[in-house]
Amino acid sequence: MSRFIDKRLSSLEAYVPGEQPKPGEFIKLNTNEFPYPPAIGVEKAAADAVNNMNLYSDLSCKALSESFENVFGYDRKNVVFTNGSDEALYLSFLTFCGKECGAAYPDITYGFYSVYADLCGIESTVIPLGKDFSVNPVDYYGVNKTIVIANPNAPTGKMLTVDEVESIIINNPANIVIIDEAYADFSAQTCVKLVDKYDNLVIIGTFSKSRGMAGARLGYLIACEELVNDIQKVKFSINPYNVNSITQAVGKAVLDNDEYYTKCVNEICKTRDSFSEDIKGLGFEVVPSKTNFVFAKHKEIDGKEIAFRLRERGILIRRFDKERINEYLRISIGTPEQMKTVYSALSDIIGGY
Amino acid sequence: MSRFIDKRLSSLEAYVPGEQPKPGEFIKLNTNEFPYPPAIGVEKAAADAVNNMNLYSDLSCKALSESFENVFGYDRKNVVFTNGSDEALYLSFLTFCGKECGAAYPDITYGFYSVYADLCGIESTVIPLGKDFSVNPVDYYGVNKTIVIANPNAPTGKMLTVDEVESIIINNPANIVIIDEAYADFSAQTCVKLVDKYDNLVIIGTFSKSRGMAGARLGYLIACEELVNDIQKVKFSINPYNVNSITQAVGKAVLDNDEYYTKCVNEICKTRDSFSEDIKGLGFEVVPSKTNFVFAKHKEIDGKEIAFRLRERGILIRRFDKERINEYLRISIGTPEQMKTVYSALSDIIGGY
């Protein structure tokens, strides 16, 4: 650390992303990526955008917005596009979590919430999940902070119903509720329609998981017009051209092929459910998942040990050195073929004990 | 503004970017874009990246870094890549301009410096340029703030020598000096080598102007290892995957075709110099430019009027409603053909008076 760093940041602990090895080195099931190729037409959209990249990108993301509206039913008045959903989260923390407000979120959730709270210098109320890793809505009633809940939650994969989320919003009328729906496409449920009813709700989403754009970085935020204007103002004070023109073109092409992505998501859910059943047969306890990953621990064998043995066999999964969950493995759902390989490897490892 | 916005941000005035009209609507000379197509091979690099965009981008920007080192002579230890140079500036303000420190910059310069200062809640010392729009180095000696200077400066196009910049660094040993070299490739001069000598210097650059990537968003920051580590820490606390994989691939391909871009930059400088001479003949006073734009005012005719007449003729340039410079036009340098059209239009407009 240099002598020049802002003192306020000197104790900051940055987010630790999952390992990103060289392509092809591993069966990579550690960061919940989409296992299928892009739809036909996406590559051409990118190439066309490259040939016009000497010009600045469209500040209003007009073409992307139109395709977004066709799929999501919300237009530019209610949407902000971002450089991945991490940026949507950061902008939300920055805009709606003043020092006088603070943030509340579960103890076990996406690791970035606490990092943003620290970075913005705000106080956090960390609310423990239940024993079964459930978010208990009542714990959030009248908490008097900006509330941030991943729904479905990560890394657990568990989900609140729309009614439960609505009860949290109703019971916090003076505070913003941020619902991070990064994995919602795998859950057959979204809270987005609540935006029409509540002026204190922010929905955040990503094209990284269900639309195969983790590398191209496209996130979004849906809220009432007034909140969107607040966020736009802050975005225009940081990086107005935050979504580059190639990503805008690729995102549009992806949305224009929504049928293909829906088919892939259905396939991933099917693979997830059968893989969950399969590993239960090997002695794993599996948290019922509404996402594109499973969160599971073996009844007898140490999680760290299994992760190590999988890595030896060329399979990368994620494990968190964190109280309550350090025995668990978070395994992303790949193609059926990849999951067969994982199952064989697990079977082999467990058979060795 | 909603009732939820952080009070600290309620008076924030966002940056106002230059107008981005529909492609083809205007001869667009208002945001200093590169007027030539990308090098051969760039389109293919993007297409290949799209086919792997389901995976997260390389956090370390390894391949891009290697090509960057070939051209700039600095490797990953000394470089941070960003989502456009605006992000490099924002990260620098956030990291090195604590409340106890503040920032100092010229009164006439890139409009984002004051926006970042406001956003970060820090105090600014605004130092007037000389009558001829020169930065006077002595004005910055011992100013005891983080110093931010665009060199060449925008929108004036004037430049400090390396020795003058070095004198500012030497006379502020306890503070960071940020030199924004967005336009340096058009000046045949860079201060980057000073990074080897000083631990309080940050150089910021962009691929938007001289490498034709305004739409693809790629910026960078070069500094000593310790400062780079500070910035990386903050970057990893905001958006670790800030540079998407397509932009990384495109940036690498652009650097691998450095000869082509150098040729284009030389062509732009030649066009700039002849265009400057040509419009002097029409009664313009032209600030000698070291950039890809000229900053000029007519001796008799109102700047606003000329801008309006050019727009009527399908030519977009930039003008700032700001004291001292509201009579000036900032005209980006396009192709020789475009500048011939602009010259004819100006000649026509001025002849009408």
Image: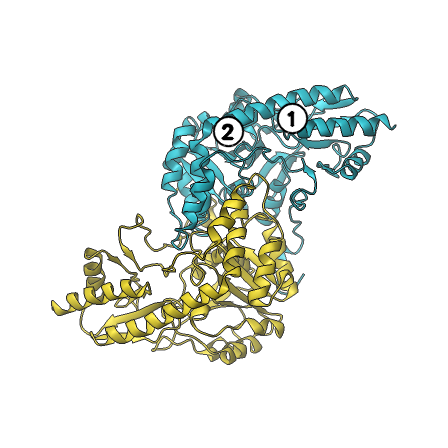
Chain colours: A cyan, B yellow
Left/right of residue A144 with respect to residue B37 in the rendered view = right
Q: Position of residue B61 (x, y in %)?
A: 60, 53
Chain under label 2? A
- The residue under label 2 is which amino acid type? Tyr
Q: Residue B251, image x and y in percent?
A: 51, 55
> Which residue is most to the right?
A353
- Answer with left or right where residue A274 lies relative to residue B274: right
Residue B94 falls in which quadrant of the image?
bottom right
Where's the N terminus of chain A, which quadrant?
bottom right
Among numbered discs 1 and 2, the one appearing first in the sequence: 2
Report whether residue A197 is seen: yes
Q: Splitting the image into 4 quarters, where does residue B230 fall?
A: bottom right
> Secondary structure beneath disc 1?
helix
1 or 2: mark nearer the eye:
1
- Work out whether residue B94 or residue A345 is closer to the camera in this orientation and state it: A345
Quick check: A314 left or right of A210? right
From the top left corner, tell me how far across and down residue B98 is, in percent.
56, 60
Q: Are marks 1 and 2 on the same chain?
A: yes
Q: Which residue is mark 2?
A: A261
State which quadrant residue A298 falls in. Answer: top right
On the image, numbered disc 1 is attached to which residue? A336
Is residue A233 in view? no
